[in-house]
Image: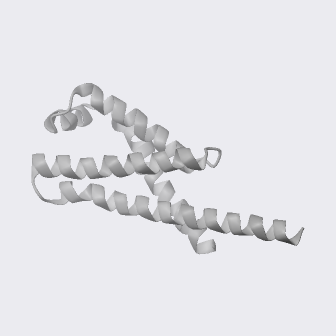
């Protein structure tokens, strides 16, 4: 289980940095606004997306949030990365810009699988404790 803990925390920390910290620090820069405009989205979309990313990354990182809410955060990030891949591919063509969201999606996948392995282990531990009582 130690390998799942390590992979979960490394992957989830990277997601937090890429999707929580970076948007919080850069979403209101002129370069970010121009990027949103080039993709054809309205300016408010960038602000809305940055807020959702910060909230979602906090939900994934902090253990106080429910499993159901974490599932929604994982789903939201998955939709975001797939949409980013498609948007970048349509506007910039097939290249690194189109496929880079899929790299982050793979990191998210590692976090997701590790999270569920840790949850399974936690449930197995609980059932073992109950059966010994």
Q: Residue at x 48, y 60 (%)?
A: 112
Give percent across and percent down for residue 84. 25, 48
Give percent across and percent down for residue 56. 47, 42
Q: Residue at x 34, y 37 (%)?
A: 26
From the viewer's perspective, is residue 18 above or below residue 127? Answer: above
Q: How is the image coloured?
A: one colour
From the viewer's perspective, is residue 12 above or below residue 128? Answer: above
Horizontal relation, residue 111 to residue 48: left or right? right
Q: Is residue 23 visible?
A: yes
Give percent across and percent down for residue 60. 53, 49
Q: Quadrant of residue 76?
A: top left
What is the number of callouts on the image? 0
Q: Residue at x 35, y 58 (%)?
A: 105
Q: Is residue 28 visible?
A: no
From the viewer's perspective, is residue 133 above or below residue 26? Answer: below
Of 131 and 56, which appears nearest the observer? 131
Q: Residue at x 33, y 48 (%)?
A: 79
Give percent across and percent down for residue 85. 23, 52
Q: Residue furthest front?
A: 131
Q: Quadrant of residue 118?
A: bottom right
**Image quarter in which the N terminus is found:** bottom right
Of 68 and 51, which appears nearest the observer? 68
Horizontal relation, residue 125 to residue 78: left or right? right
């Amino acid at each position: 289980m130690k390998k799942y803990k390590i992979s979960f925390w490394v992957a989830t920390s990277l997601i937090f940095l890429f999707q929580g910290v970076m948007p919080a620090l850069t979403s209101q820069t002129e370069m970010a606004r121009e990027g949103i405009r080039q993709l054809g989205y309205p300016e408010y979309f960038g602000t809305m997306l940055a807020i959702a990313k910060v909230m979602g990354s906090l939900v994934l990182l902090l253990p106080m949030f429910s499993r159901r809410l974490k599932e929604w955060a994982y789903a939201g990030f998955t939709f975001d990365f797939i949409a980013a891949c498609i948007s970048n591919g349509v506007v910039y063509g097939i290249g690194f810009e189109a496929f880079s969201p899929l790299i982050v999606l793979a990191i998210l996948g590692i976090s997701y699988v590790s999270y569920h392995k840790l949850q399974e282990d936690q449930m197995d531990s609980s059932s073992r404790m109950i059966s010994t009582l």
